[in-house]
C-alpha cells in the first residue's frame, strides 16, 4: 500500500524530488501496523493534546463515518506535523492576497488638492534616478582583475555578474528617464513604458526590471537591496576576493558554486565530477572571518524557514513562536572527493533562491540540498511541511528550507 500510493498511483504524478520525499514520510507515518490493530485506537495526530483525530478500533463503516464527522472543520497545523507558525504564515498569505485584490479594484482617483499622478511619477522617478548606481566599466574591470591572483573561475563569475548587472542598471536608467519624458508628453508612452509607470505608482517592481534576478520585495526594499548588491561587487573589484561571500548578492548562485568546485578541482588535480559537498556551519560572524577557507568558500546571508539554528549545540531546533524566518550562520561550502553518504542524524535541506519555492519555468528556485545536523529530532520530523507562500492550501511543501534571499 505504501509503495502503491506514495510511488505509483499518487507519487507517480509528483515530479519534484522533495515533494515525493514528503509524500513518503506522510504515508509511512499513517500506513502502519498500529493503524489497523484491533486492540488500540490509532491517533492520527499524536502531536496534539486531546487529539480528535482518532481511528476507532473494530469500527464498522457507519462508525468510521461518524468518527470522521466529529473531526474539526478547521485543522490545526500541529495535526499535520507542522509548527504553529505555519498557521500565521498561511494567514499572512491570505491577508496579502485579499489586500492586493482590494487595491486592484480601487479606482485611480486623486482627491482634489492632492498630489497629481503626474507629479507623483516625476517625484518617484527623480528620487530613484539619484539612488540607482552607475553602470560598471566592464573593460576596466577586466583590465584591473587580469593581474590579480584570484582564481580564474571566480574571475569569470565576477565578469558575468558585472555584465548582468550592467544590463539591469542600463535598463533602469533608460526607463526612468523615459517615464519622466513620457509623463511630460515629450516621448510616446508605449505599452511597456505604461506598465512600468503603473508598477512604480503601486511601489511594485516592474517585470522589465525582474529579468536579472527573482525577488518578491516591494519596490523600495528592492532598490535598497540592489544598491547593496552593487556595493558588494564594487568592493570585490576595488579591494580583494571576499573571505566570506554574500551569497544573495549573486544573480546566479549556482554559477558561483560551480566555480567553487572548479577552483577546488584545479587546485587538487582531480576531476570535478568526483566532487560533492559538505556544509560545515561556522559559528563566527561573517565580519569576523579573517582567513580564506582552505578549500571551498564561506557564505553568509541565508535564512531558515520552519526552524532555527541552535548555536550552542550546532543543530536544528524548533523556531520561536511568531518568528517565521531566522538568520542562518555562515556556511562553509566545502568540496570533498568521493564523499561517503551519511544518513543518520543528517537532514538534507533544500536551498532556494527566494521564498517562492516553485520559481518559474525559466528560472527554477531550487539551488542545492544542504546537509545539516538534525539535533534531537530525526530527519523525517523536519521533512513535514510548514508553510507555502504561493499555494497555502497545498500541503506538499517541505517543512524546513533554506532561503538565499528573504522576501
Image: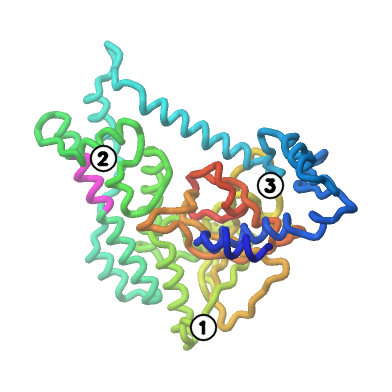
- Asked whether the viewer can see residue 288, the reply is no
Q: Secondary structure at mark 3?
A: helix
**Mark nearer the N terminus (3 vs 2):** 3
Q: How many marks?
A: 3
Q: Nearer the viewer, residue 290 or 276?
A: 276
Disc 3 to disc 2, C-alpha distance: 49 Å
Asked whether 301 falls inside the magenta stretch, the response is no
Q: Quadrant of residue 186?
A: top left
In the image, 146: left or right of 396?
Answer: left
Pick whichever, 267 or 83, lies toward us.
83
Magenta residues (range): 168-177
> What is the spatial separation of the Cα atoms under label 3 and label 1, in whole angstroms?
39 Å
Badge 3: few (under 14), some or many (20 or more) residues near its Cα, within 10 Å? some
The residue tagged 2 is 129
Name the residue at 67% across, 38% down.
75
Q: Earlier in the sequence, mark 2 or mark 1?
A: 2
| Dominant secondary structure, magenta | helix
Give the numbered dot on residue 96.
Answer: none
| Residue 80 tag number | 3
Crowdedness near tag 1: few (<14), some (14–19) or many (≥20) residues, C-alpha within 10 Å: few
Amino acid at each position: 500500500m505504501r509503495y502503491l500510493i506514495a510511488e505509483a498511483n499518487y507519487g507517480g504524478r509528483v515530479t519534484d524530488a522533495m515533494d515525493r520525499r514528503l509524500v513518503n514520510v506522510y504515508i509511512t507515518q499513517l500506513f502502519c501496523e498500529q493503524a489497523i490493530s484491533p486492540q488500540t485506537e490509532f491517533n492520527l495526530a499524536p502531536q496534539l493534546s486531546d487529539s480528535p483525530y482518532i481511528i476507532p478500533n473494530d469500527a464498522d463503516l457507519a462508525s468510521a463515518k461518524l468518527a470522521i464527522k466529529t473531526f474539526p472543520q478547521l485543522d490545526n497545523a500541529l495535526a499535520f506535523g507542522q509548527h504553529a507558525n505555519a498557521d500565521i504564515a498561511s494567514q499572512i498569505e491570505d491577508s496579502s492576497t485579499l489586500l492586493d485584490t482590494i487595491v486592484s479594484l480601487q479606482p485611480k482617483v486623486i482627491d482634489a488638492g492632492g498630489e497629481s499622478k503626474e507629479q507623483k511619477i516625476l517625484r518617484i522617478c527623480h528620487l530613484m534616478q539619484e539612488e540607482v548606481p552607475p553602470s560598471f566599466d566592464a573593460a576596466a574591470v577586466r583590465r584591473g582583475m587580469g593581474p590579480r591572483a584570484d582564481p580564474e573561475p571566480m574571475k569569470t563569475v565576477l565578469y558575468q555578474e558585472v555584465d548582468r548587472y550592467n544590463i539591469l542598471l542600463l535598463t533602469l536608467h533608460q526607463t526612468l528617464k523615459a517615464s519622466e519624458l513620457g509623463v511630460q508628453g515629450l516621448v510616446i508612452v508605449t505599452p511597456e513604458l505604461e506598465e512600468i509607470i503603473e508598477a512604480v505608482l503601486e511601489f511594485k517592481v516592474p517585470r522589465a526590471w525582474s529579468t536579472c534576478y527573482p525577488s518578491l520585495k516591494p519596490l523600495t526594499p528592492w532598490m535598497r537591496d540592489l544598491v547593496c548588491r552593487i556595493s558588494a561587487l564594487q568592493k570585490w573589484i576595488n579591494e580583494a576576493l571576499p573571505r566570506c561571500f554574500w551569497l544573495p548578492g549573486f544573480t546566479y548562485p549556482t554559477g558561483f558554486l560551480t566555480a567553487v568546485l572548479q577552483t577546488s578541482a584545479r587546485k587538487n588535480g582531480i576531476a570535478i565530477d568526483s566532487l560533492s559537498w559538505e556544509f560545515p556551519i561556522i559559528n563566527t560572524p561573517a565580519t569576523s572571518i579573517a582567513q580564506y577557507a582552505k578549500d571551498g568558500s564561506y557564505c553568509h546571508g541565508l535564512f531558515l524557514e520552519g526552524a532555527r539554528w541552535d548555536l550552542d549545540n550546532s543543530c536544528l531546533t524548533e523556531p520561536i513562536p511568531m518568528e517565521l524566518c531566522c538568520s542562518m550562520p555562515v556556511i562553509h561550502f566545502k568540496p570533498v572527493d568521493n564523499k561517503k553518504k551519511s544518513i543518520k542524524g543528517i537532514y538534507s535541506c533544500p536551498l532556494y533562491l527566494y521564498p517562492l519555492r516553485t520559481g518559474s519555468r525559466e528560472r527554477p528556485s531550487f539551488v542545492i540540498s544542504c546537509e545539516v545536523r538534525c539535533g534531537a529530532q530525526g530527519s523525517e520530523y523536519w521533512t513535514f511541511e510548514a508553510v507555502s507562500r504561493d499555494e497555502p492550501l497545498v500541503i506538499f511543501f517541505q517543512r524546513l528550507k533554506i532561503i538565499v534571499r528573504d522576501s
